[in-house]
């Protein structure tokens, strides 16, 4: 008996202490003043009004099965998910031929398999990994997506769409922008006056104009600049525009890193008798790029979000293709727009939030390394 | 430190191989280096010029072949299409030049309002993120993380097609006090009508708007230099503010309101704020506010903790500490990236093209370009407008920075 009551007391003790702790915590963090109490209560009211309604719309009142708009015309209808399920393939692959979709999936798989070990610091063989991503993967990617040689049927780029195009533009844009940006940043800090002026003009030009005008330029103005008959694919034209645009931003990010390298590093390299390129490639860039990894990821995120703009010049990225299918009369319900945008927002958010978390992780990792404090 | 040595040593190994080269070659290289640099630069410049010459000659050839006129003469010819929002008189007979100004003014309007809204919201959220109130700080953080990670264009579409598109048609729109109606084409408000004699009221109002801030500044200067505030200032302020009202009443209330009325399928009278404008303004200001909030937070965190503690120690309360000690110091950190965001907002307002809000890009680089086909000239003008906006901003920014560093130097 005594043992039991002891346990009871103990338990009650712990309960009271948790309660007391909770009360203490709430006093400090939620109700420290009348003003704070009012703020807390209105915040709770806001959450009370939005969160249950959101869950209800997303899950409870939502339709999950159905073939057409009939499934989504209930009273108090929530999200219309059958719309997404039915259009899923278009949203991811665009109008890519159904029997060739495995090629796109293979590209996704290769990209994932190539990028993941690159992003995890603990995985070795970074050099080979980078070689695969920079040299082998783009060739494989082009071969698989476009085809036309060695047994794969040709798929023209106007049939590519959806998430594929979004990832393609963001990926190619950044892959091209990084080396170009590094060269521009080096040029901007160069001692050669003409070169420096050219780089400054280039960078400030692209940073000063909105991306839409760049895309207009790529779609309407660029064909005029080529000799008669030498015009090429619209997707490729937009890719060039996006790459040049984001290289200017990348150059500014890299310049930030270059400026952070102390002059002593340059002096030491010179004292060893190194020339400019040897010093830059072996001493300066490895350190500068390491500092700006978060900045590079941020500019990747910015470009990833900006890919949506290509829909204005008639390419169908993820948002473009969703927007296109929202006009489908077979699925026109009051909730279709909300559902389509919620789906797009969720996908974009997952990608961007994931990347920004990764950049914060890298920032912490690099920040704690002793090599940076010297 | 350990890590830094590795590249140096590896590089050193490479260099020692170089040292084995005949000495004369090294000297020869050193002598030639400046000349080589000059040659390389000239070569790059030549290539750039060649590139531009090449594309220009191609463009001229192509334009001749496609029978497209060139030059800026089209700016004087008739545009021939209507624009649903123009801040200056504009009709279908107006010229492309006038269209350019209409578009530019619409861009500036939505940017200016967007900047004002985004700043207010951004400051509130940025301060809320640092609040000691746990739930408020978390809500602000959630707002920033959600809004920043969703593309702006998607947000514009959401407000335009989903949210504002779901409003009822004008015929079934519910009114507020029978004067404000929200429907799926926009919001209709009563419009002030300036009748005869209203000019005096307006002039006095303008005078008050100009003189009041000046007077307040003078009062502060007097207080700071002499320690006392002249008594007449308060009465002057009241007089300035009451004068327009008195004029309004004395001239027989010449300003009336034109209420919107439903006629057929749409409203007549009143002012309509278009759905495109509202969607763009909402999306731009909510999106940019998230970035401004982060800038404000970083600025506030950059103020040393000792400053807050010192302010507390001399007995300032929290709002006073914020207003007198923290914010003035944080502003120095906040303003440069803040102007950058303002510029971004202005550039982002070009997304108007996607929902056909008649901004510069939409009417000029869109419709006018399609009609005339003069892509080069039109895109050139459009880019020049945006470039000059950003150059002006960076000049202002540089001057601000220079003033700041001068002030820092003069302070002991």
Image (spheres, coloured by chain):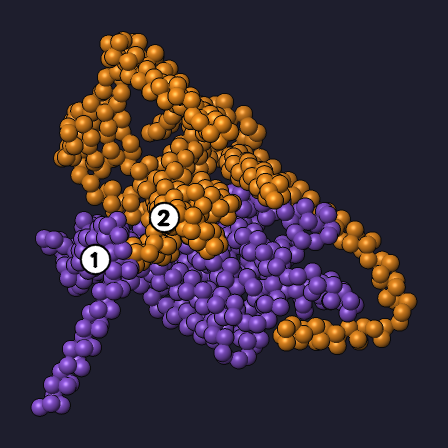
Q: Categorize mark 1 by other alpha carbons within 10 Å: few (<14), some (14-19), many (20+).
A: few
In the foreground, B14 or A19: A19
Please report the residue visible at 36 percent of the width from the left and 41 percent of the height from the top.
Answer: B120
Q: Colour of chain A?
A: purple
Q: Is residue B362 visible?
A: no
All told, the count of numbered labels is 2
- Residue A126 image offset from top left, x and y in percent: 55, 76
Is A288 drawn above or below residue B338 in the view shown?
below
Front position in the image: A297 or A227 = A297
Q: At which x and y percent is residue B346?
A: 45, 40
Q: Is residue B166 left or right of residue A373?
A: left
Q: State whether residue B129 is above or below residue B78.
A: below
**Residue B136 higher or lower than A271, as above or below:** above
From the image, tell me which residue sits under label 2: B318
Locate the N terminus of chain A by quadrant. bottom left
Q: Which colour represents chain B?
A: orange
Chain identity of mark 2: B
Secondary structure type for disc 2: helix
Q: Is residue A214 left or right of residue B59?
A: left
Callout 1: chain: A
Instruction: Kindly identify which residue carries mark 1.
Output: A51
Residue A14: which quarter of the image?
Answer: bottom left
Which of the pair B311/B203 is nearer the observer? B311
Residue for point 18% across, 56% down: A48
Q: Residue at x 22, y 37 (%)?
A: B184
Task: Kindly identify the residue that appears in the image at 34 percent across and 11 percent down.
Answer: B200
């Amino acid at each position: 008996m005594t043992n039991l009551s002891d346990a009871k007391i103990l338990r009650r003790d712990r309960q009271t202490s948790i309660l007391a702790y909770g009360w203490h915590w709430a006093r400090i963090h939620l109700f420290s003043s009348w003003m704070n109490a009012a703020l807390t209560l209105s915040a709770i009211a806001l959450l009370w009004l939005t969160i249950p309604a959101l869950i209800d719309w997303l899950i409870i009142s939502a339709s999950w099965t159905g073939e057409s708009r009939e499934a989504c015309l209930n009273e108090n209808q929530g999200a219309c998910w059958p719309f997404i399920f039915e259009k899923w393939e278009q949203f991811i692959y665009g109008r890519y031929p159904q029997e060739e979709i495995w090629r796109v999936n293979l590209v996704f798989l290769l990209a994932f398999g190539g990028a993941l070990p690159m992003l995890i610091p603990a995985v070795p063989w970074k050099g080979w990994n980078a070689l695969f991503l920079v040299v082998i993967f783009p060739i494989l990617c082009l071969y698989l997506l476009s085809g036309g040689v060695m047994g794969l049927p040709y798929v023209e780029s106007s049939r590519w769409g959806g998430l594929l195009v979004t990832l393609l533009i963001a990926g190619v844009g950044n892959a091209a922008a990084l080396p170009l940006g590094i060269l521009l940043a080096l040029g901007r800090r160069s001692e050669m006056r003409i070169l420096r002026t050219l780089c400054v003009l280039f960078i400030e030009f692209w940073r000063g104009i909105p991306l839409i005008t760049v895309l207009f330029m790529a779609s309407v103005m660029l064909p005029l600049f080529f000799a008669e008959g030498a015009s090429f694919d619209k997707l490729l034209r937009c890719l060039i525009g996006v790459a040049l645009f984001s290289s200017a931003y990348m150059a500014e990010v890299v310049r930030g890193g270059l400026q952070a390298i102390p002059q002593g590093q340059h002096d030491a390299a010179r004292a060893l008798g190194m020339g400019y390129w040897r010093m830059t490639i072996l001493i300066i860039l490895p350190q500068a790029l390491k500092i700006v990894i978060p900045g590079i990821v941020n500019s990747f995120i910015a470009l990833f979000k900006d890919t949506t703009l290509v829909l204005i010049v008639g390419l169908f990225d993820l948002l473009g293709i969703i927007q296109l299918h929202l006009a489908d009369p077979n699925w026109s319900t009051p909730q279709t727009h909300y559902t389509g945008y919620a789906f797009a927002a969720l996908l974009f958010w997952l990608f961007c939030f994931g990347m920004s978390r990764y950049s914060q992780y890298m920032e912490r990792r690099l920040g704690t390394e002793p090599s940076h404090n010297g | 430190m350990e890590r830094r040595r590795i590249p140096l040593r590896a590089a050193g190994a490479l260099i020692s191989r170089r040292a084995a080269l005949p000495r004369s070659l090294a000297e020869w290289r050193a002598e030639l280096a400046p000349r080589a640099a000059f040659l390389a630069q000239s070569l790059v410049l030549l290539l750039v010029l060649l590139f531009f010459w090449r594309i220009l000659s191609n463009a001229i050839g192509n334009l001749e072949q496609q029978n497209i006129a060139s030059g800026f003469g089209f700016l004087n010819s008739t545009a021939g299409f209507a624009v649903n929002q123009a801040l200056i008189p504009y009709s279908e007979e107006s010229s492309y030049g006038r269209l350019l100004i209409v578009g530019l003014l619409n861009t500036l309007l939505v940017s200016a309002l967007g900047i004002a809204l985004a700043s207010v919201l951004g400051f509130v959220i940025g301060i809320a993120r640092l609040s000691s109130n746990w739930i408020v700080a978390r809500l602000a953080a959630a707002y920033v993380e959600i809004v920043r990670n969703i593309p702006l264009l998607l947000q514009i579409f959401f407000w335009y097609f989903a949210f504002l598109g779901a409003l009822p048609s004008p015929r079934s729109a519910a009114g507020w006090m029978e004067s404000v109606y929200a429907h799926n084409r926009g919001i209709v408000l009563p419009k002030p009508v300036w009748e005869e004699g209203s000019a005096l009221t307006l002039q006095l109002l303008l005078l008050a708007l100009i003189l009041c801030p000046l007077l307040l500044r003078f009062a502060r200067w007097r207080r700071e230099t002499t320690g006392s505030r002249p008594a007449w200032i308060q009465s002057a302020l009241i007089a300035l503010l009451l004068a327009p009202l008195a004029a309004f009443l004395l001239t027989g209330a010449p300003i009336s309101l034109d209420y919107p009325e439903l006629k057929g399928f749409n409203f007549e009278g009143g002012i309509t704020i278009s759905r495109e404008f509202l969607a763009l303004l909402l999306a731009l200001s909510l999106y940019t506010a998230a970035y401004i909030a982060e800038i404000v937070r970083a600025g506030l965190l950059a103020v040393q903790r000792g400053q807050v503690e010192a302010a507390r120690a001399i007995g300032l309360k929290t709002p006073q500490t914020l207003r007198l000690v923290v914010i003035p110091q944080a502003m120095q950190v906040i303003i440069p990236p803040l102007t950058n965001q303002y510029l971004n907002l202005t550039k982002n307002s070009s997304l108007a093209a996607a929902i056909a809000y008649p901004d510069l890009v939409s009417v000029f680089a869109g419709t006018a370009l399609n009609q005339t086909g003069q892509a080069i000239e039109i895109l050139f003008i459009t880019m020049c407008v945006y470039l000059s906006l950003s150059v002006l901003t960076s000049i202002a920014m540089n001057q601000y920075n220079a003033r700041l560093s001068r002030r820092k130097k003069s302070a002991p």
